[in-house]
Amino acid sequence: MEPERHPMDDLLREDRLPHIWCSGCGIGTAVTCFISALLKSGLDLDKVAVVSGIGCTGRVAGYIKLDSFHTTHGRAIAFATGLKLANPELKVVIFSGDGDLIAIGGNHFIHAARRNIDMTVICVNNFNYGMTGGQVGPTTPVGARTTTSPYGCFEHPFNIPYLAAASGAVYVARWTMLHVRRLERSIGEALAKRGFSLVEVIAPCPTNYGRRQRRRTGLDSLKYYHQKGVIKHGANPRDVDIDLDGEIIEGVFVDIEKPTFSDFCQEGLSRAMGNRGP
Amino acid sequence: MRYWRKPLDIEGLKIPRGNIQILKERCKGCGFCVEFCPQHVLEVSEEFNSKGYHPPYVKDGDGCVSCGLCEMLCPEFAIYRLEEEREVQVL
Ligand code: SF4
Ligand code: SF4
Ligand code: SF4
């Protein structure tokens, strides 16, 4: 008899499964949505590269059987930029977490968006640093209890879609991982987009974040998303803050066209070189 | 599926049906598939896998409409469907 094979196994490093993510963690679902979108995209899989930083979501690159790159903390976008510039044919996807991309990698994030470098960023936001034990991160809502905020978080969080849009991203969407079909579609649209696209995926971290907000299991978080998720396509990213226990506004917030960094490079180079050609 | 009156094109109609496959050893018992299957096809089993989780089992396979939600929602790549078709029956 044929051994049992999951249809996504062709794109997974099977020998590493089961993966390290906890029971009820949402990162795996973000990966299934990505793989499913990738299979539907018609992209040449030999020309897709996945880059991750450090953290639980930083493990994604290690499980996907494509050219993949597990980089240093916060630097996924920096490595990805090099990859894209050296080999413009590649479709470069950055798959990492909120802490990695928005805190330590925050500057790379805003500048890649500002330059409109052609890449797709999938940012899994679970509101804390899961891998290191659940500390306050750049997206932890005011009042949330974590290991380093036992009296509730005193900091204002980043609103990731607003940050991306203000920095110049051409495609910005947010979905909870419960909305798998919509998330898959958005990832597909982001992959098809020229320029800097961002998909934020709200996902449970039951082990470190959820249980301190009285959502002990991943399933509790999914029920919460089901209750509090509100779809508002085209909402102003400024208005999509996430409060502790509040509504989670989801949808495609930005979808515009503008020249990418490579467009300007091409144009500038041919102008400078005249007829001689680069 | 039941119809009160027989649709004229009943002969040609097929309803997709999923033959659900569960890779028990990969499952971590999160229950997402069981909770969100719109057809309530799945149920948590009493059985343990080698890591001590309870994988789901197919309680009502006839109900499955092969929507694929369980497959997409599963964080462990542990459940998928083989798509089949069945005739529409008129009762
Ligand atoms: S610590 Fe949190 S984010 Fe990390 S694998 Fe566990 S549930 Fe997922
Ligand atoms: S394919 Fe859809 S109907 Fe069938 S078991 Fe999965 S979720 Fe339920
Ligand atoms: S969703 Fe996957 S891991 Fe969770 S109970 Fe179902 S089969 Fe197991």
Image (cartoon, coloured by chain):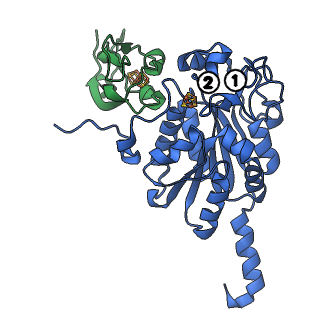
Residue at position x 46%, y 20% in the image: B30
Residue lying at 51% horizontally and 48% vertically, measured from the top left:
A61
| In contact (CB < 8 Å): disc 2 and disc 1 | yes
Q: Quarter-wise, where is residue A258 in the image?
A: bottom right
Residue B72: image location, x then y, percent:
46, 31
Tell me, yes or no, whether dots 2 and 1 are on the same chain. yes
- Residue A11 coordinates in the image, percent (x, y): 41, 47
The hue of chain A in the figure is: blue
Task: Indicate the amino acid at tag 2.
Answer: Asn
**Total of numbered circles in the picture?**
2
- A235 up-or-down from A170: above or below: above
Label 1 marks which chain's residue?
A
User: Which residue is found at the position 77% from the left and 22% from the top?
Assistant: A243
Q: Identify whether A17 is placed above or below A259.
A: above
Camera-nearest label, 2 or 1? 1
Please identify the quadrant where the N terminus of chain A is shown: top left
| The one of A69 and A148 positioned closer to us in this rendering | A148
What residue is shown with label 2? A208
Residue A43 seen in this snapshot: yes
Kind of residue indicated by mark 1: Thr
Q: Around disc 1, counting alpha carbons within 10 Å, would you say few (fewer than 14), some (14 to 19), or many (20 or more)?
A: some
Colour in which chain B is drawn:
green
Asked if the beta carbon under badge 2 is closer than 8 A to the nearest atom of ligand 1, the reply is: yes
- Secondary structure under the numbered disc 2 in the rendered image: loop
What's the mark number on residue A147? 1
Q: Is residue A108 above or below residue B73?
A: below
* Crowdedness near tag 2: few (<14), some (14–19) or many (≥20) residues, C-alpha within 10 Å: many
